[in-house]
Amino acid sequence: MTSPVFPADVLARLLSSDSGRPRLTWYDDEPGPTAGERIELSAKVLVNWVSKAANLLQDDCAAGPGTTVGLDLPPHWRGVYWAFATWSVGATVVLGEAVADADVLVTTDPAAAAAHGGDSVLVSLPALARSHPAAADAGGAVDEAKELSTHGDQFSPMSDPEAGDLALSVDGVDTRYAELIGTRPGSAPAPRVAVDAGLAGLLEVALSAWSADGSVVAMRGSADLAPSTLARRLATEGVTVSLLPAPRGEGGPPSP
């Protein structure tokens, strides 16, 4: 029987394949403080973020197999590395209505952080944030923008997950580590996949694309772009697979 592939294995393969190649490109097209941002992460940079977040979870929150980590985050590049950090320590990512019940809460909401009974991490979405402006209202939560840089760039888990351990729980639908990584039928090697979905959907696409040595162009608010603008972006980014929703008033996703 073939051994299951875990998220940490996927990241290790990306590093060994081509550490400098862009693996996650992020566009934010929604109104707000991060509107207009474009962030590009190579495998090396992505793993660096994952390692720092995993060290924070393991060292500051004692997270490991059996720990639940609620990600109260939008579909965003920061949500991706927090999910992979959770999987790196062997814990369970919780999404949806039950996030507040998780042992550890990772959130952008200071009030939610303050109300949480366990460990909490307050996340700032802007790429250049150095502290959260409302950290004082978060009830002692870790200010990610201020504290994450103090954690190590290399990560060694104290315990590895088992294949049967719970990796992901989304509104009561549970996925074990052995079932977490799948490849979409007919997907070609090294796809460059465009996606605009909720965090669970973004994580599914990232796991699938990266396990095929591919990359992801993740967007938020792409349906409100002019079709011509979106088509140019897909062409510029070299997208080979588009999983984007239909633009407003259009009948289907644009062709790359």
Image (cartoon, grey):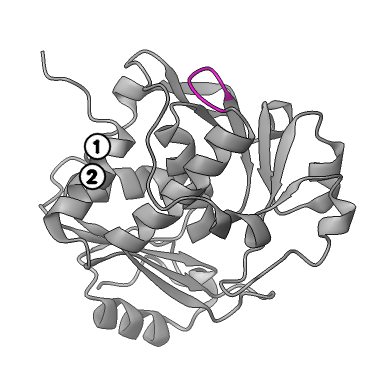
The span from disc 2 to disc 1 (Cα, nearest Å) is: 5 Å
Density class for disc 1 (Cα within 10 Å; few <14, some 14-19, many ≥20) is: few
Q: Secondary structure at mark 2?
A: helix
Seen at 40% across and 35% down, the residue is 88
Q: Is residue 232 magenta?
A: no
Residue 71 drawn at (x, y percent):
61, 41
In the image, which disc is placed on residue 12? 2
Residue of label 1: 9
Instruction: Assess whether residue 65 is covered by the magenta stretch.
Output: yes
Q: Quadrant of the N terminus?
A: top left
| Residue 172 location (% of width, % of height) | 58, 22
Q: Position of residue 150 (x, y in %)?
A: 57, 56
- Can the viewer see residue 95 in this picture? no
Q: Is residue 8 left or right of residue 67?
A: left
How many other residues sit within 10 Å of disc 2, few (<14), some (14-19) or many (≥20)? some
Residue at image point 24% right, 37% down: 9
Amino acid type, residue under disc 2 in the picture: Ala
Q: Is residue 91 left or right of residue 244?
A: right
Q: Main secondary structure of the magenta part?
A: loop
What residue span does the magenta drawing correspond to? 63-67
Q: Are marks 2 and 1 in contact (CB under 8 Å)?
A: yes
